[in-house]
Amino acid sequence: MIKKVFIAAALFCSAGVAAQAQKYSIVIKGGHVIDPKNNINSVMDVALKGDTVMLVAKNIDAREGVQVVNAKGLFVTPGLIDMHSHNFFGTKMDQTYSNGPNALPPDGFTFRTGVTTVVDAGCAGWKSFPDFKKQTIDASRTRVLSFLNIVGEGMRGGTYEQNVEDMDAAATAKVAKEYPEYIVGIKLAHFNGYNWAPTDRAVEAGKLANIPVMIDFGGSQPVLPIEELFMKHLRPGDIFTHCFGQLASREPIVDVKAGKVKPFVYEARKKGIIFDVGYGGISFAFSQAIPAIKTGFYPNTISTDIHTGSMNNAMKDMLNVMSKFLAMGMDLPAVIKASTWAPAQAIHREELGNLSAGSRADVSVLRVLDGKFQMNDTGTFGFFDYTGAKVQGKQKLEAEVTIRAGKVVYDLNGLTNPIVVSRR
């Protein structure tokens, strides 16, 4: 018995010594790396140590990693960033997205879709942000950042979001400056009315806190002209979300009759306005996106606007939205850029969304499914929007392994050796 204990202890010690001798905590072997920031688009290996990317190179010795991820035949990308999400979930049933039932706990849907960072899009305002931080940001393994709502009460729905008097630029900016690690911008959402005051107050808060603004027009009749929004109210670096929406209460960016992107939209892009997908429940239509994509007008950033309604409808999740843009004609590197490096730049978090040495060790390992092997008779995948319009695509993205902060947090098919999926 003593001999067995001695042998077990010796094996444990030797394993510990071996682990200490290994240079990296994880080596990802044989995958096709797409890192838009660094213009990498080839088969490479990736080495991580703790929460840091150490090296991207050919033929890193697998023996130098405590864990090895077999990524042969797969794509290795920076961890996906969903820049428009709703995460202030709670039990206050009359508060919709602000500590209410319409928002989602992030860890339940992020890692299984390759997402390592979400940006909550205005669920909390300056009055409720401390609760959001304690309840969601601090309790989540997913990195959770925030666009702070210009409405002090946050995204509570109803008359709360129509209350211009609760849109306090100074109070909003003050809270944003108190939490610079988490608050990356200001959000205006759901206001209904022909009134520029909400936009201007959000932009004023953005100026005071030196952060961008994300604008989601709720709607008005007549519609607020988006040329005036882009050229007279927003600043370079401000974000126009739901950019491919087509609703009677909002002006679209594509002229529906002509099927062409309006000329001033190109001027807005030159100015530096960021066009974000923000797919949502009814805020994306193929009738807007397809003409834009065909003429080369790609979104700057791809995001979901995920909530309890959109996730079970046409939108589904981040990878489904990305797959739709593949089906519409964007190539894979462009789709990856719009889901990693471009949102990192938009929210001024350049340590994210790339695999540079020294960047954060958030990595997604993705499989591109081929329709001819998956769908039998059609050879394609079907993608639809909320209007019922449908497009066929030959490819669909699926997450195989997700690494967050240098730890494997999701492994679909056990590609990690040894298999140790971190629980906390």
Image (cartoon, rainbow, N blue to C red):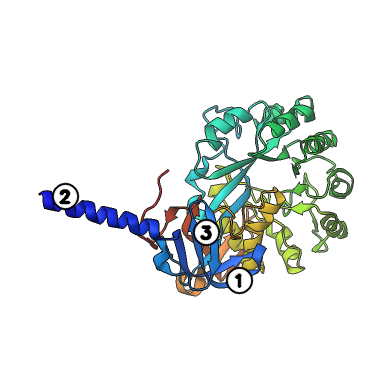
Q: Viewed as shown, does residue 1 lie left or right of 258? A: left
Dot 3 alpha-carbon crowd within 10 angstroms: few under 14, some 14 to 19, many 20 or more: many
Give the quadrant of the C terminus: top left
Which label sits in the foreground, 3 or 2? 2
Q: Position of residue 402 (x, y in %)?
A: 48, 56
Q: Residue at x 72, y 48 (%)?
A: 241
Visible in this render: residue 297?
yes
**CB within 8 Å, label 3 to label 2:** no
Visible in this render: residue 277?
no
Circle 1 residue? 41
Q: Residue at x 55, y 31 (%)?
A: 134
Q: Amino acid at mark 3?
A: Ser
Observer-nearest residue: 186 or 62?
62
**Given the current orientation, which residue lies at the most extreme left position?**
1
Tell me where residue 264 sits by quadrant.
Answer: bottom right
Q: Position of residue 273 (x, y in %)?
A: 80, 52
Which label sits in the foreground, 1 or 2? 2
Between disc 1 and disc 2, whose residue precedes?
Answer: 2
Q: Amino acid at mark 2?
A: Val
Instruction: Determine the CA span between mark 1 and mark 2.
Output: 50 Å
Regarding mark 2 in the picture, which secondary structure is present there?
Answer: helix
Dot 1 alpha-carbon crowd within 10 angstroms: few under 14, some 14 to 19, many 20 or more: some
> Quick check: 218 above or below 167?
below
Instruction: Determine the CA span between mark 3 and mark 2.
Output: 41 Å
Observer-nearest residue: 38 or 385?
38
Circle 2 residue? 5
Tell me where residue 86 sits by quadrant.
Answer: top right
Regarding mark 3 in the picture, which secondary structure is present there?
Answer: strand
Q: Amino acid at mark 1?
A: Asn
Q: Which mark is residue 364?
A: 3
> Quick check: 332 above or below 338?
below
